[in-house]
Image (cartoon, rainbow, N blue to C red):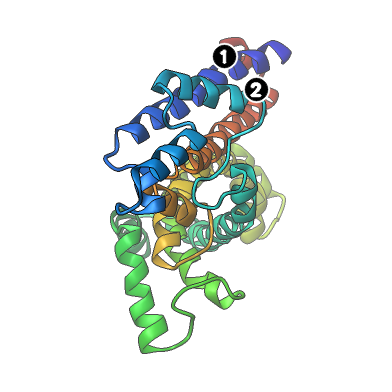
Amino acid sequence: MRGFFLRRLAILIPTVIGAVTLVFFFLHMIPGDPVEVMLGETAQQADKERLREELGLNLPLYVQYGRFIAGIVQGDLGGSYFYRRPVVQVIAERVPATVELALAAFLVAGLIAIPLGIVAALREGTAVDNASVLFSLLGVSIPNFWLGPLLIILFSIKLGWFPVSGRAGVASLVLPAITLGAALAAILSRMTRASLLERLGEDYLTVARAKGLPEWKVILKHALRNALIPIITVMGLQIGVLLSGAIITENVFSWPGIGTLLINAIESRDYPLVQGCVLFITLSYVLVNLLIDLLYGWADPRIRLRG
């Protein structure tokens, strides 16, 4: 198990370095000067040069990159140009909001997808099954930047049930969670259906029925329990998708999380803050993948031998 973990960790490290390296160089290719954004185009040239030297932007690009990588190794992501505070502090303040939204989206997806997938599997080929297919197609096809405003118009402006934007209690969380969780619910419902259909013909279900267990207990306790393994895997792998999707959703609803922070940092050419946000998202994704690999390796020794 230890060797399996070290092999997976060896893959994780270059993945993170590659991601932050691409972001670093792509950011510096974007037109615009962060000094002019901060001081304005009418500022004196001497003031611009002084600030550029203070921020280290006058150094060659390879020197800036070396400092950036050295800072990551030491746990120092530098200081935000806009907020004038350490990047780690700025990101840490926004993480709870993003985690809250991601967990709510997971909850929404699970409450919709699991029951829908079970019913679709038990009613294969019926109108209910066809409706679940239609829901899956719509959920995957409709983008967040369209679904979010649509929900705002209907439930916030027309009906007045939920706040339009912001983070002020459970009510303000409902629409962003539905927007973010819709695509995940569509994927999970089809995965639940397919995984459950594979188990419905197993012999152990016949044995359970022969023991006199009620049908609902046969389905939920035996069939669904064994079908959850691939479903949980998909849910874990979708964390990265949720974080990237949260960038759009948070901006639509003015949700004060990592996504909104990242967009604001890009607009203000706040290089250290953009790099810190991307590093957080990348680490979240690869760490979840690493955890899933380890769980699979623990559950099935054959994976450890192949990995």
Q: Amino acid at mark 1?
A: Gly
* SS at badge 2: helix
Classed neighbour count for the residue bearing mark 2: other residues with Cα under 10 Å, few (<14), some (14–19), many (≥20): some
> What is the quadrant of the N terminus in the image?
top right
Instruction: Name the residue at 44% across, 78% down.
Output: 164
Q: In the depicted view, which residue is nearer to us: 99 or 22?
A: 22
Image coordinates for residue 263, horizontal then vertical, percent: 41, 52
Number of numbered discs: 2
Determine if residue 203 is in view. yes
Pointer 1 residue: 307
Q: In the depicted view, which residue is nearer to us: 244 or 276?
A: 276
Instruction: Name the residue at 48% across, 39% down.
Output: 278
> Mark 1 touching mark 2, by CB under 8 A?
yes
Q: Is residue 208 left or right of residue 111?
A: right
Q: Amino acid at mark 2?
A: Gly
Q: Residue furthest bottom?
A: 159
What whole-number distance in Å separates the C-alpha atoms at marks 1 and 2? 8 Å
| 205 to 26, vertically: above or below | below
Instruction: Name the residue at 39% across, 55% down.
Output: 124
Pointer 2 residue: 297
> What is the quadrant of the C terminus in the image?
top right
Q: In the depicted view, which residue is nearer to us: 176 or 129?
A: 176
Q: In the depicted view, which residue is nearer to us: 139 or 77?
A: 77
* SS at badge 1: loop
| 234 to 19, vertically: above or below | below
Q: Earlier in the sequence, mark 1 or mark 2?
A: 2
Image coordinates for residue 241, horizontal then vertical, percent: 45, 45
Classed neighbour count for the residue bearing mark 1: other residues with Cα under 10 Å, few (<14), some (14–19), many (≥20): few
Instruction: Name the residue at 54% across, 45% down.
Output: 80
Q: Quadrant of residue 86?
A: top right
